[in-house]
Image (tube, rainbow, N blue to C red):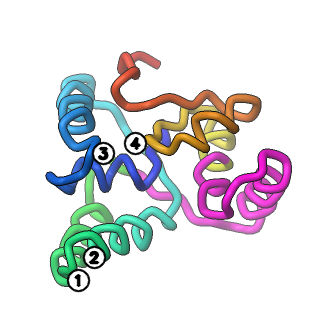
Amino acid sequence: MVLDANVWASLLLDEDAHHALSDAWFRGMEETRQLFFGPYLLLPEVCGAISRRTGDSQAAEQIMRRLAHLSVLQLLPLDRGLAIRAARLAAELRLRGADAVYVATAQALGVPLVTWDGELLERTAPAVEVRKPATDSGAD
């Protein structure tokens, strides 16, 4: 499954409103040895979110390095084909550009998108299966 950057940020930030649910969900996913996917865009998005919310740029960079080398996370390049797919989805579903990249990644891989973003949850169902971490059963 493709995880939106906000799911990673909620897991990594104790003060995030969704931290407890994300943490419990990830613990359940660890038992299934689930492989997660995301675009390389995930790294600056999570790093920026951590830095903005904590004011600690060094901690954000450490987290980015950990994510980049996490064995359960496979990052995919934003090549021309994925960029065009994302642009079409952005126009069709009225999405922000970065959000469309996550939808396009999930669509290209044929896997669900997991997010806390209400706009993605509302708008992307025609293009890809989308759900919140707390409602995911872990079975695909």
Residue 58 sits above or below residue 94 on the image: below
Residue 77 is one of the magenta-drawn residues: yes
The answer to the question of whether label 4 and label 2 lie on touching residues, with beta carbons closer than 8 A, is no
Amino acid type assigned to the residue bearing label 2 in the image: Ser
The reply to whether the C-beta atoms of the residues labelled 1 and 2 are less than 8 Å apart is yes
Amino acid at the residue labelled 4: Phe
In the picture as drawn, the residue positioned furthest to the bottom comes out as: 57
Label 1 near label 3: C-beta < 8 Å?
A: no
Q: Is residue 53 above or below residue 14?
A: below
Q: Going from the N terminus, do you reach mark 3 or mark 1 first?
A: 1
Q: Which residue is mark 4?
A: 36
Q: Nearer the viewer, residue 81 or 58?
A: 58
- Of tags 3 and 1, which is closer to the observer? 1
Residue closer to the observer: 127 or 79: 127
Q: Secondary structure at mark 3?
A: loop
Give me the C-alpha separation between circle 3 and circle 4. Answer: 6 Å
User: Of callouts 2 and 3, which one flags the residue occurring earlier in the amino acid sequence?
Assistant: 2
Give how far across and how far down residue 40 sits, in percent: 49, 65
Q: Nearer the viewer, residue 24 or 121?
A: 121
- The residue indicated by pointer 2 is 51
